[in-house]
Amino acid sequence: MKICVYDWALHSIGGGQKFDCKITEHLSKTNDVDILSLFPVSKKQLEEAYAVDFSRIKNFKYLYKKSSLNPTLLHLFSFRKISRIAMEYDLFFNADAHETVKPNARYNVMYCHFFGLKWPKPAESFFDFVKLCARWLLKTIARNYARQYDKVYCNSNYTKAWLGKKWGVNSSVIYPPIDIPKKISARRKSIILSLGRLTPDKNYEFTIECFKAVYDAGIKDYECWICGSEPPAEYYEKLKKLSEGYPIRIIINPKGRELNKIYSESKIFVQAKGLGINESKYPALLEHFGMSAVEAMAHGCVPILLNKGGYKESVENGKNGFLFDTREEAVEKLKMLVKNQRLWGRMSRNARQRAKKFSLERMQGQIDEAMRKAIKSGKI
C-alpha cells in the first residue's frame, strides 16, 4: 500500500512529532511510506531524536525549501498543495489535524494531537493580535474537511471531547506510545525533574519556584533539573536568573541514552502546563496528553502534575502520582515524597505499572487494527 504521512512541524522536536515518527516507522514495515513536511528534514536527525528506523521510508517530501514567513502561518496557506499531493496515495495520514486539507487519497485518516482553534490563545501584543486576526479570518473562510475523513483518531479523551464540541467529529483515542524500559536503575539521585519543550507555556518557572520552596524549608539534599529543546534566548535567561543561588541545572537537547539516564536517575517529575488558563476559552493551552510525564513514570519517576487536561488521564491521583490545583498543593506533595521514602517507593512501582498502559506495542496493535478497518472498507 502506498501511504503518505503528513506532519508540517517535523522540523521541530516535540512529543507529537515523536508519535508521528513511531507510527511512520511501524507503517513502513509492510507498506511503501513517504513523509511529507513543511520544510526539509534530516532522516538522521529524526532517527536520533526519536529512536526510529527510517531505512524503509521511500521519500522525504517537503513543501518549501525555506521561508521568512512564520511557519505556523505558512502551513495554514499550504492546504491546496497538500490536497493535491494526497491524490497520489492509497492512504493519506494527516497526522497534523490540518482540517483545511481536502482528503483526496483513496482512504484518508486524520490524527489529532490537538486541533487548531480559530483563536487559540490570548493576544500578547498588537502584532500578535494582528497575526491571530489573520489566522481567525483564514480559518473562518477556509473549509473544514475533518468530517469528510474516513476516520479521525486523537491522543486522549480530553482531545476527543473538544473535537466533538468544536468540530462535531466522533473520534477514537489512540494514546501516544511510550518506550517501557525492561530494567530501571537502582541508583537514584535526589532529583526533581521537569522536561519537555523549553517554552514559556510549559511553566518551568513554576517548577523552579516549587523546588525553591522545598529547598528553603530545609530539604537541601535535592537538585532540580530542567531539561528540553533549545529555548528562546530571553526565556533561557529568565530561567537562569530564577535559578541563581540554588542547585538547579538547565540541560539543553538531551537525546537518546542521556535522556533515558536523566529519567532513570530522577525521583520526582513536576509539570504545570495550563496553570492559570481558562480551559473553556483556551483549551489548546493545556497539556493534551503529556508524553514526557508518562515517559518519566515508565522509569519509576513519580509525577506531580496539574489537575487539568490530559494529565488527568495519565495519573491516578494518590496511587501512582499526584494531581494539584494550586502551588501550595504542589509544594505539599513534593514535601511528602521527599520526606517519605516508603511512600515514594510504592508510588514509583505503581507509576511504572501505570505507564505500561501506554506502551509502544499497544499503539502498534491499535494502528494495525486501524489499517485492517481501512482495507475492509473496500476503498483500498
Image (cartoon, rainbow, N blue to C red):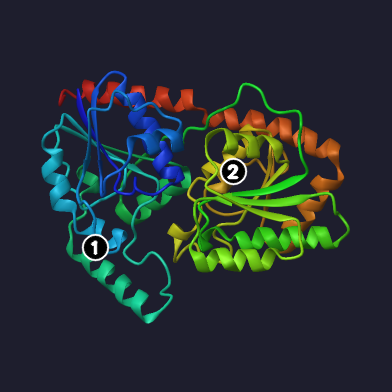
Marker disc for residue 139: 1
Spot occupied by residue 205 in the image (x, y as percentages of width and height): 63, 63
Q: Nearer the viewer, residue 277 or 50?
A: 50
Spot occupied by residue 162 in the image (x, y as percentages of width and height): 40, 52
Spot occupied by residue 358 in the image (x, y as percentages of width and height): 52, 31
Q: Nearer the viewer, residue 311 or 46?
A: 46
Residue name at image x 67 percent, y 34 percent: 264
Question: Is residue 212 toward the left or the right of residue 160 in the image?
Answer: right
Q: Residues within 10 Å of mark 1 (few under 14, many from 20)?
A: some
Quadrant of the frame with the N terminus: top left
Q: Badge 2 is on which residue?
A: 293
Quadrant of the frame with the C terminus: top left
Q: Amino acid at mark 2?
A: Ala
Residue name at image x 24 percent, y 63 percent: 139
Q: Amino acid at mark 1?
A: Lys
Q: Secondary structure at mark 1?
A: helix
Residue name at image x 18 percent, y 52 percent: 79
